[in-house]
Image: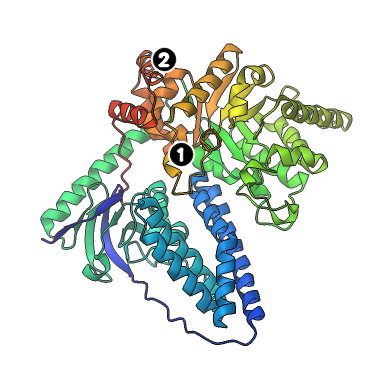
Amino acid sequence: MNTIKGLPVSSGIAVGKVFLKKTISEKISLVKVKDQESEKERFQTARVKAIRQLNEICSDMLHTKGEQEASIFSAHMEMLKDFEFINRVAGVIEEQKCNAEWAVKNIRDELVEIFESMDDEYMRERAMDMKDISNRVIRILKGDESDGTLRLAEPAIIAANDLAPSDTAQMNTELVLGILNENGGPTSHAAIIARMLGIPFVVHPQITSLTANGQLLAFDGETGCIELELDSEILFQYQKKQEAFIEKKRQLEKLKGTKSITGDGYEIVLAGNIGASKDVDRVLQQDGHSIGLFRTEFLYMNRTEAPTEEEQFIAYKETSEKMQGNPVIIRTLDIGGDKEVDYLNIPKEENPFLGYRAIRLCLDRIAFWKVQIRALLRASAYGNIHIMFPMIVSLDELRQAKCLIEEVKDELRNEKIAFNESIPVGMMMETPAAALMADVFAKEVDFFSIGTNDLIQYTMAVDRMNGKVSHLYSPYDPAVLRFIKRITDCARENGIWAGICGEAAAEKALIPLWVGIGVKELSMSPVSILQIREKIQSLSKMDCEKLAEKIFTMSTAREIEDALKNTNKPVSNRRIP
C-alpha cells in the first residue's frame, strides 16, 4: 500500500489510469533583430489573436457553464490588454533589440516571480494565469496553430505539473476521471472550473514524479488521499464509495417530477440559465420548471454582423415551444463590460462595467435594438415568453424601454402579426440604485430577477478578479443581503414576484435564507437543480423565517456565512468516474 496525502480542491472519487501531462519548459532563444518595429508589430498581432481565442473560450464557458467561470477568461483578456504588460514587452524588444518571443518570455518570468513571492494566496495563484496568457502569445508567435487543448483518447486521470485554466476549460470532460496537479489551490482558476464541472481535483507538489503513464490509481477529492498502488482491498473501498455516490444520484433522480416545496408548503420555482435554445434540453433533463435567464448576447457573439430578426425569432420560438407553456424569461441584449462584440464598435473605456453596456447601449441604438424586440414579441405567440431588461438604474430608462415595446406592438398589429398582448415585462435588479428604488420599480413591472453577481460587485465596489480586494466579494455580506431582502419585500408588497438568477441562487447554505425572505424563483446552472430541490424539500418555511430574522441581526459576512454553513450540512456532489 502506498498512500500519499494532497490538498483537496474539488470533491469526488476517481479510479483509473494516469495520463501524464508533464510540461517541459520550451526553449526560447534570444535572437537579435535590426527591425524592432516589426517585432513589436508581430507581438501586437499575436496578442490580438490570443484575445480572439480567449474571447471564444469565454463565450463558450458563459454559454455552457456560467458567468463565474467565463469571468476567468474575461480577466485573461484584460491582462493581455493591460498597457503595462504591452509596454513592458515593447520595452524589452526595444532595449535588447530582440525577438518578440524572447521579450514575452522575459516579462512572463519576471511577473510570475513577483506573483509567486506574494503572501496572498490568491495573488500567488495568478502566476498560473500569467503563464497561461503569455504561453498562448508565444505559441502564436512561433506559428503553432494548436490551441493548446489537452486531447485524451480514453478515460483517464490527468496528472500534471502545470495545468493551466485554459487546459481545464477546453478538455473533453467526458474523458476526465479526475485531476492531480502539482500547483494551485482552492482559489486557482483550474480548480474553480473543475468544481463547476464536478471533476475530482487534488494538488500534490510531486505528483508527476510519483506517477507514470498508464498507472492505475485512485484518489478522493474530498479528503485529498491518493492511492498510488491499488490492491483488492483498496479497490473494494473505492468501489463502495462509488456505489454510495451512485445511490445518492439515484435518490436525486427520484426527485424528478416533484415540486421544490418545503415541508410546510412554500414552493420555489427552480429554473435554468441558458445561452441558446439547444440548452433547454439540459434544463428539461434536470427537471427544471422554467427558463429563468436566457442570455441573448450569445446570439450576437463570435460573428461578423448582428443576427437578423428572423434568426432571433427562430431561436426564441424554439425555446418557448420546447418549454411547452412554462415561463421562458429572456434577457434583452447585455453586451459591454466583459462581453465584447467587434462589429458594434463600442468605444474602449477605463471602467467598462460602469460604462456603455446593456440597456444603456440599447437605448442609444434604438433601431438596432428594435430588431430584438420585434423577434421577442413575434415569438411570444408560441409560448410563455417574459421580457427582462438588464442594468436598469432609473425609472426613465425603464419607461423608455417599455415605450419601445408598445411602439413595436403597434407595428405588429398594423402588420397583422400575432404576439402576446399581455407579455410579462420585468427587470434585473443588479445595482444599488435599483434596489433602493425597488418600491417604485415594483409598480411598473411584472417581476424582478436579482442578478447577484453584479449586485455584489456594485454594492461592494469590488472587482472579484482583483486579488487585493476579492475577499470583499461575498454573497454573505450584510449590505448585499439587506438589498436582496428589500427587493423581495417591495415585490411582495406590490403583488409581483422576485427571483434570483445570479451565482448565489445555487449556493446551498443560502437556500434557507432565500426561503425565509420569500424568494419565489431560483435560476441556476441545470446541473444544480435537483440538489437544490432536495435542499428545499428538507426545509420548513417557518424555521427559515426565524433563521432569517437571526441572520439580519448580524453585522459581518464571516458571521453570517458561519451561521448559515453551520446550520446546513452541504449535500455531497461527488462524481463517479
Q: Is residue 96 visible?
A: yes
Q: Residue 125 lies in what quarter of the image? A: bottom left
In the rendered view, tell whether residue 306 sits above or below residue 410: below
Between residue 530 and residue 444, name the one nearer to us.
444
Q: Is residue 568 left or right of residue 452?
A: left
Secondary structure under the numbered disc 2 in the rendered image = loop
Q: Under tag 1, what secondary structure? A: loop
Q: Which of marks 1 and 2 is nearer the N terminus?
A: 2
Alpha carbon distance from label 1 to label 2 = 33 Å
Q: Position of residue 232 (x, y in %)?
A: 12, 57
Residue 25's x, y, as percent? 39, 76
**In this rendering, which labeled residue sits more in front, label 1 or label 2?**
1
Picture coordinates of residue 13 (x, y %)? 27, 50
- Kindly tell me whether residue 326 is visible in this rendering: no
In the picture, residue 560 is in which quadrant? top left
Query: How dense is the environment of label 2, judged by Cα within 10 Å: few (below 14), some, or many (20 and up)?
Result: few
Name the image quarter holding the N terminus: bottom left
Q: Which of 265 and 162 is in front in this view?
A: 162
**Residue 324 or 498: which is nearer the viewer?**
498
* Disc assigned to residue 473: 1
Q: Mark 2 points at which residue?
A: 265
Q: Is residue 280 shown left or right of residue 413?
A: left
